[in-house]
Amino acid sequence: MENIEKQVQEHAKKLLAEGKADVIIGYEKGTLPSQTAPCFITDPDDAGRLVWNRFCSVNLAKYAHDIIFRHKESQQRTKPEERTKKVVGIVARGCTTRSLTIHLQEKQYDRDQIVIIGVPCTGFIANKKISIAVDGREVVECSVNGDSLSVKTKDGGKDIPLRDVLADNCLTCRFNNPIISDVMIGEAAPPMADAEREYEGIDEFENLPVEERWAYFTKEMGKCIRCYACRNACPSCYCKTCFVEQSQPKWVGAGIDETDTQVFQIMRMFHTAGRCVDCGACLEVCPMGVDLRKFLKKLDKDDFQLFENRAGESMDSLPSLSVYSEDDKEEFIFEP
Amino acid sequence: MTEKANENWEPKIIAFVCNWCTYAGADLAGISRLQYPPNVRLIRLPCSGRVNPFYIVKALQEGVDGVLVSGCHPGECHYISGNMSARRKFALLKNFLSYVGIEPDRTIFTWVSASEGEKFAEVIKGVTEKVKALGPAQKLVKKL
């Protein structure tokens, strides 16, 4: 992994020095030992700040979209012949490249506007799982040694098997290697062991009685404080004006009414149908630990089972709601 | 909107219908003097593809007991493919709403063409019966 980190830095430096990218989006050391922060490198000499480790959790595709879009907007009053393109270099693992693929398919920017530094990934560590493992105590030091994570708190240390702290979406990941890349670093990572069991929890939940499902849904949504962190972190949520902020029409109330929260969550999740890449960004940023994945994964499962599509798996398979087929299944259609 | 279920309770159902097929079908049912329950309020839209899934969720939140969406049969869309894009959205939405715990019979999708006045009356009868069997909507309903 350190080797990969070095190569990421070298490539970033080279891209910036040769002028092939205006900015490199990557991860840098965070202020907390168990976290990394996204960083934006424009000076080749700063490339040393980039890191690559198990704590790199956020999906950087979000920032690529943001930067390119802001730049485009800032040029609205520039003469067309004088407009410039922003080229963004991005350190991308499998799920990040899937998000980038979706952006490209949805024509958010051109392929030549992103330079993808592909890195193999073996899963990131979910911060919430660390907190649970150390009973919410403050983590002073954190490091990965082989297959275990050693955490030091003020009261002492603890070794946790890596499997227990890896994010759920990483454990069942099918796409841990980049789908598309301009530079590929290191060797392809081996597939995750549980990939075939990705819909296990969903099947189980589907078989519960309807009242129990509703009880679980309302319990989870009851935690939501409507901070919109999930939306802000989601690379597929890039609308200029999100429906929650729209006032004409006012789709969803902003008060404390619980049904407003439920409707917000249902619709936000539904808007990512066929586009959610299961990167875990929303789960990682959620301050309340809402189990969004239980519901997002259902959309993913239906998407695959009904339309044989996995979001962003290749440039040719478009998001399933932007295409149609004449022989789509229609068992759900009511015939009197 | 959340009156208790009693003998006199009648469900409120919103139907989003396509201008070219189902609305004309409803017209035909009327012209043919076919009887069907008066619980359904029709909202005419250009195409079933115009039905934003949000309309359905919003209608449920505003307290309707059931939502019906009806358009042209696949392959007969006035706009060539509107209903086929809609079909994909509805398939996911219906599954998703029932997954989170809303009774599947509260959201019903069907196709009725302009010549199927009789089928329209049958659909409305069927939907009303289904929703009646479920009783008044409680979930997702905004209490005022």
Image (cartoon, rainbow, N blue to C red):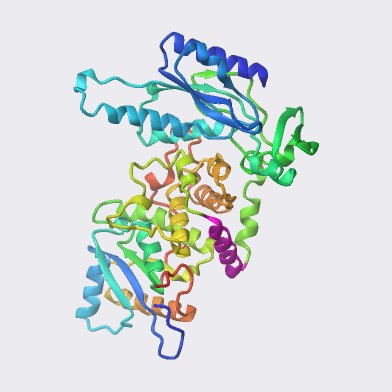
Q: Relative to the observer, which residue lies in front, A207 or A241?
A: A241
**In this view of the protein, can residue B128 be seen by the observer?**
yes
Q: Is residue A178 above or below residue B126?
A: above
Q: Position of residue A204 (x, y in %)?
A: 65, 58
Q: Relative to the observer, which residue lies in front, A237 or B69?
A: A237
**Helix, strand or loop: magenta stretch:** helix
Horizontal placement of A199 versus A193: left or right?
Answer: left
Q: Magenta stretch containing residue B129, yes or no?
A: no
Q: Position of residue B2 (x, y in %)?
A: 43, 78
Q: Relative to the observer, which residue lies in front, A197 or A15?
A: A15
Q: Position of residue A127 (x, y in %)?
A: 64, 40
Magenta residue span: A209-224
Q: Is residue A42 above or below residue A256?
A: above
Q: Quadrant of residue A7?
A: top right
| Residue at the (74%, 43%) spot, across then down | A134
Q: Is residue A335 above or below residue B35?
A: above
Horizontal placement of A87 versus A202: left or right?
Answer: left
| Residue at the (37%, 67%) spot, across then down | B59
Q: Position of residue A147 (x, y in %)?
A: 77, 31
Q: Quadrant of residue B60?
A: bottom left
| Residue at the (50%, 54%) spot, across then down | A225
